[in-house]
Amino acid sequence: MPSHRSDLLLRRWPLVIAAAAVLTFLLGVGGAAAVRLMIHRYDSSVTRGDLLSAVSRPDETGVDPRVRFRQTVRGPLNFLLIGSDKRAWSPDAGERSDTIIIAQVNQDLTKVSLISIPRDLLVDIPANRALGFEGGSDKINAAFSYGHGGDTGVQLLSATLTRLTGVKFNGAAIIEFSGFRKVIDLLGGVDLCVDHAVQSIHTGKHFKVGCVRMNGADALDYSRQRYGLPDGDYDRQRHQQQLLKAIFQRAGDSGLAYNPLKLDQLIRAVGSTLTVDTGGVSLTDLMFGLRRLGPDDLTGIKVPSYPDMVGDVSYVFLSGEAPSLFTALRAADLPTWVTAHPKWVNPL
């Protein structure tokens, strides 16, 4: 039988990427060697990408790469997470990214702040003449399309976010929604609370108010709705943040660590639908560095902003409190900002 200490470890491993959290549950079963073996298998199954623009990476001038790769993972860390309903390198990759989240891990690697970027946010997208793009103002989720999708699409998106916020990124990931569906189904569903009844514009399904266990298809369908909700896209952002927490929570409660077959299925399901850029740090070292994180360590934040029409086109514009959020993000002092601006914090 696992010890109380093992049970605690099973619930408090890395949660920036769902698969990483699940893999490290093996600590309570086979120890660190088994964990590293499984992480290595996962590490070799994911697609590697050059997802970040040079201007969006931390300045490492004068740092010996041999030393950098041996360094212990230290905070604060910033990750760019992108959700897509298509593989980034598919023929339809030119479509706009559906979900954009900045995840900041604090200095001592014990808390994660999830900042959802409104996909209709009007921003200045920098030029990239190598891609044939001269730059201009547009919705932020257009940057992925102007970058022709794939690695170059995320590079242009990351450069846009760096221009907007001043933040540099330690890593990035593109997550295909079908991978999330598989993970949720392998976990036996996730528990979500519907706070406002809504009918899906994708499937026609009615989601009634109440807390229920949803399968992968329903959970993703619900989390992508914005029409018919009181706060529109802001509700969608909050529901997506809640879904991430629900996946992490369910992974800890499901006993997956004791089912090698399902664990292997999850590794393969996530690995085939994920493209990552860890900035040169091994995925193994990154996950071990984040091992103390758990589902209760997540904070959801929405960018201070408001929707408005320009002609017949709907945009989102930054409001007066946004610059202070970006300042706190650059300073890795989001908890202080959250305390001072509770109306922009999402209940998870």
Image (tube, grey):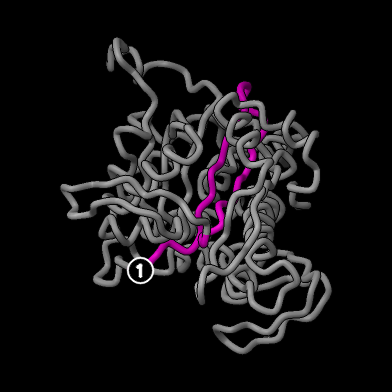
Name the residue: 31% across, 39% down. Answer: 53
Name the residue: 56% across, 57% down. Answer: 118
> Is the N terminus in the top left, top right, bottom left or bottom right quadrant?
top right
Classify mark 1: helix, strand or loop.
loop
Highlighted magenta segment, given as a residue range: 95-120
Image spot of residue 206 (x, y percent): 71, 86
106 falls in the magenta region: yes
Image spot of residue 242 (x, y percent): 69, 57
Q: Is residue 31 left or right of residue 194?
A: left
Q: Is there any visible trace of residue 41 in the rendered image?
A: no
Most foreground residue, 222 or 132: 132
Image spot of residue 225 (x, y percent): 62, 73
Name the residue: 48% across, 64% down. Answer: 98
Q: Is residue 293 left or right of residue 41?
A: right
Q: Is residue 78 above or below residue 263?
A: above
Q: Residue lying furthest bottom in this view?
A: 204
Q: Please name the residue that numbered disc 1 is placed on.
A: 95
Badge 1: few (under 14), some or many (20 or more) residues near its Cα, within 10 Å?
some
